[in-house]
Amino acid sequence: DTGVSQNPRHKITKRGQNVTFRCDPISEHNRLYWYRQTLGQGPEFLTYFQNEAQLEKSRLLSDRFSAERPKGSFSTLEIQRTEQGDSAMYLCASTKGGTVGYGYTFGSGTRLTVV
Amino acid sequence: SQQGEEDPQALSIQEGENATMNCSYKTSINNLQWYRQNSGRGLVHLILIRSNEREKHSGRLRVTLDTSKKSSSLLITASRAADTASYFCASSLSMDTGRRALTFGSGTRLQVQP
């Protein structure tokens, strides 16, 4: 298993365009998370899936953002009508479920630049 | 707002010295985790300490947790230049306080001079 994979690694887009990112988690992990990170800050939670169910969304996730995890495998994060303020690193992480608590495995992220 | 806040924001030490980073959080937690991030890369999980634990070790890492003070510390002993990175604490809230996703602090940027 090669860990959590995110594509693309970098994306430059013009303001107003739509972009979509993909995350492939570790296959046996049923929980998947999306975070956004800007320079010098910690990751900010966006949304969380358990299997295919989207269980929580942050207030940061405006109506321009949508995420899916069909069949509980890979996930996509789409941003519509991008704005310059959307420029950030978008990180995906996965972990096992359960109440015990496990560390997250993060992907290398997708760096979005909106020009 | 961030659940955890790290202190200091930046730390510069010589190779071989110990580095201590502190983290404070606001609400009841299930566990607290520390992550490392090299510039421009994803985060790497270092260690997890549960709310009923007070201290945990992993190699050159030592983590403490004081739930009465809502604080944690990460100690890296005998630091190496390769330890240069940003370090984040992340708290997993108790089930009764809501969010099941980790909430991260703003990080400590550690520079280890060779």
Image (spheres, helix red, strand yellow):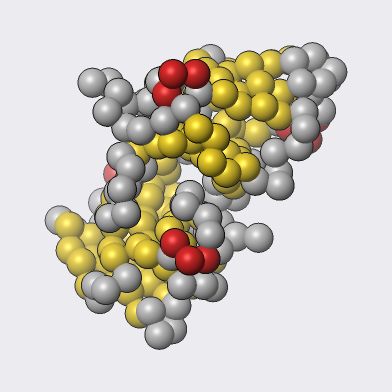
The residue nearer to you, when weighing B56 against B81, is B56
Left-right relation of A20 to B87: right
The residue nearer to you, when weighing A86 against B114, is A86
Left-right relation of B66 to A67: left
Q: Position of residue A10 (x, y in %)?
A: 58, 18
The residue nearer to you, when weighing B42 against A92, is A92
Q: How many labels, in total? A: 0
Q: Position of residue A9 (x, y in %)?
A: 52, 18
Residue depicted at 77% across the width and 32% down the height: A63
Q: Quadrant of residue A82?
A: top right
Vertically, is B60 above or below A35?
Answer: below
Vertically, is B22 above or below B93?
Answer: below
State whether residue B72 appears in this view. Answer: yes
Q: Quadrant of residue A64?
A: top right
Vertically, is A42 above or below B2?
Answer: above
State whether residue B8 appears in this view. Answer: no
What quarter of the picture does the C terminus of chain A occupy? top right
Residue depicted at 51% across the width and 72% down the height: B27
Left-right relation of B25 to A41: left
What quarter of the picture does the N terminus of chain A occupy? top left
Q: Position of residue A15 (x, y in %)?
A: 83, 20
Residue depicted at 44% across the width and 62% down the height: B95
Residue, far right: A16
Residue depicted at 54% across the width and 41% down the height: A55
Left-right relation of A6 to B64: right
